[in-house]
Image (cartoon, rainbow, N blue to C red):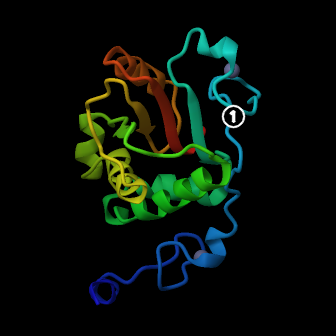
Amino acid sequence: MKQFLLNLFFPRFCLNCKKEGTLLCYDCFSLIQILNKRYCPFCHPAKPGNTCPSCQEKRFIDALYAAAPSNDFIIKKIISQLRKNYFKDLSLVATFIIANHLYLCNRLTVNNDFVLTFCPCSLKEKKKIGFDPAEEIAKEIAKALKIEISGNFFNKKVFLVNDVFTEEMDSFAKKIKEKGAEKVFALTLARD
Ligand SMILES: [Zn+2]
Ligand SMILES: [Zn+2]
């Protein structure tokens, strides 16, 4: 009922084909090339797997789960729309895509050893957009995976959320590890 009322007052149109009904229709969702593998976030060209041993020596992110290739045209549209406040609910779409990627490539059991945090955007950007896109996605992922958003990283495995993977995430991962985190896994829509 609530959803019906929301649709009535705020009609949704697919961000790709403009069909009325949802923010991303099923046909367009199925065009996204959701990855079933993860890749070393620092190697170019990317090596499959976790952060590779040679990158691990000087980096802090242990693995990157990036849901789709960065040149995927629907993912590009989602990322650009996420930065406009009237598309705030796109964080649900982003979460659905990230959760699908985790399901496709992941054998890890998410339990109480995990907490979730996000890479905050600048205050200037937050003011401009009206919210922090990474924070909104993190809130939805926390609900979907049934884990807490927390700043208590001691002995925890930490999911670090952002819309796209950036090198900056690694400096953030360094701070998380300084607070005692066991592992840091980056979780994003695209690699960069
Ligand atoms: Zn569509
Ligand atoms: Zn590497």
Residue 114 position, x and y percent, is: 40, 39
Residue ID at (71%, 44%)? 37
Callout 1 secondary element: loop
Q: Quadrant of residue 191?
A: top right
Location of residue 112 with respect to 151 vertically, above or below: below
Hey, which residue is sitting farthest top in the picture? 57
Residue ID at (35%, 58%)? 143
Residue 29 position, x and y percent, is: 62, 69
Inspect the image, locate mark 1, and give the three-letter code of the amino acid beneath it: Tyr
Q: Is residue 192 visible?
A: no
| In front of the other: 75 or 160 | 160
Residue ID at (26%, 32%)? 151
Which residue is denoted by mark 1 in the rendering? 39
Mark 1 Cα shell of 10 Å, populated few (<14), some (14-19), many (≥20): many
| In front of the other: 54 or 112 | 112
Regarding ligand 2, which quadrant of the image does it lie in? top right
Residue 76 position, x and y percent, is: 58, 53
Q: Is residue 147 visible?
A: yes
Residue 137 shown left or right of residue 103 in the figure: left
Q: Quadrant of the C terminus?
A: top right
Residue 64 position, x and y percent, is: 58, 35
Residue ID at (29%, 90%)? 1
